[in-house]
Image (cartoon, rainbow, N blue to C red):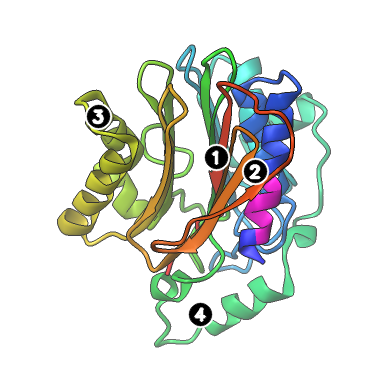
Amino acid sequence: MSTAGVCSAARAGYTILRGGGSSMDAVVEAVSNLENNPCFNAGCGSVLNIKGEVEMDAIVMDGLTLGSGAVSAVCNIANPIQLARLVMDKTSHSCLTAEGASLFARSMGVPEVSPESLITEYSCMRWAKNMAPDANPVESQMGKMGTVGAVAVDSEGNIACATSTGGMLNKMEGRVGDTPCIGSGGYADNQVGAVSTTGHGEAIMKVTLARLILFHMEQGQSVEAASDLGLAYMKSRVSGLGGVVSVDPQGRWAARFSSLQMSWAAVQTETLHYGLYAGEHFTQSLGGAPLTGSTAHLASKPLG
């Protein structure tokens, strides 16, 4: 289910690029697609906090201007990633949180949804299970549906990233993880590349994983090698597991993870690439004419 979801979202993002849309249009479309899929921990399907409520975080970043927008602890918006883009486009701020984000959404005419509509039976079951005294919510989250994210390069050479999440299982009310933090949950710079991350948020923030990987790329490492170096450092330094999707300005991409699995998909020159476990890499032709210079790459990023 998760692999089918990321493949569908990658195709949706690539369709935007084929139609002349920007990399930002593409990553927001792809992540919105995943937020609307209850199989993932974002939007509908988000995990619940200690009170049994949804609190969601999201970020977008534009590699051309280094502009970014983020929201945190939002509970009544179906697509936090779209609200994060509005923060970038319509305010002078980088992040709005909780009720302030909701007030801004209303001012922008973003429809509100009932928080209950974002809660699935599966999320409720996991919440109840992790209320047990001996439960380990972090360990329980491994191998299950995860944070969603995307990176893309468009035909103009502009790069963007987007990341969205419901956070950690049974987290404290008001807890904000890595996702909306620039440099941790994501980073995009036309001169270097873009990264979207997943994993234990507190570990990712300690090493600013997205920016760390781009630092390695600035030093001449390939996308894949830089991603592996960043993940290895997080594991050795703070015992954190995670995964990333990364891309450079030439459209070379990587989906790398230190966890047992991560659903990922990418589309380039009319070929869909996807996988779940380490070493897996399947391809499927989409049958159209190649679109030179455009890449859509994303992952649902469940840990395990």
Give the number of the mark in front: 1 or 4: 1
Give the number of the mark in front: 3 or 4: 3
Q: Which residue is mark 4?
A: 130
Q: Can you see residue 302?
A: no
Marks 4 and 2 sit apart, C-alpha to C-alpha, by: 32 Å
Residue at point 43%, 23% (across, down): 250
The residue type indicated by label 3 comes to Phe
In the structure shown, which secondary structural element does the residue marked by tag 3 occupy?
helix
Above or below — where is 148 with respect to 24?
below
Q: Are marks 2 and 1 in contact (CB under 8 Å)?
A: yes
Marks 3 and 1 sit apart, C-alpha to C-alpha, by: 20 Å
Q: Position of residue 148 (x, y in %)?
A: 56, 50
> Does label 3 or label 4 sit earlier along the sequence?
4
For the N terminus, give its image quadrant.
Answer: bottom right
The residue type indicated by label 1 comes to His
Residue at point 28%, 50% (across, down): 231
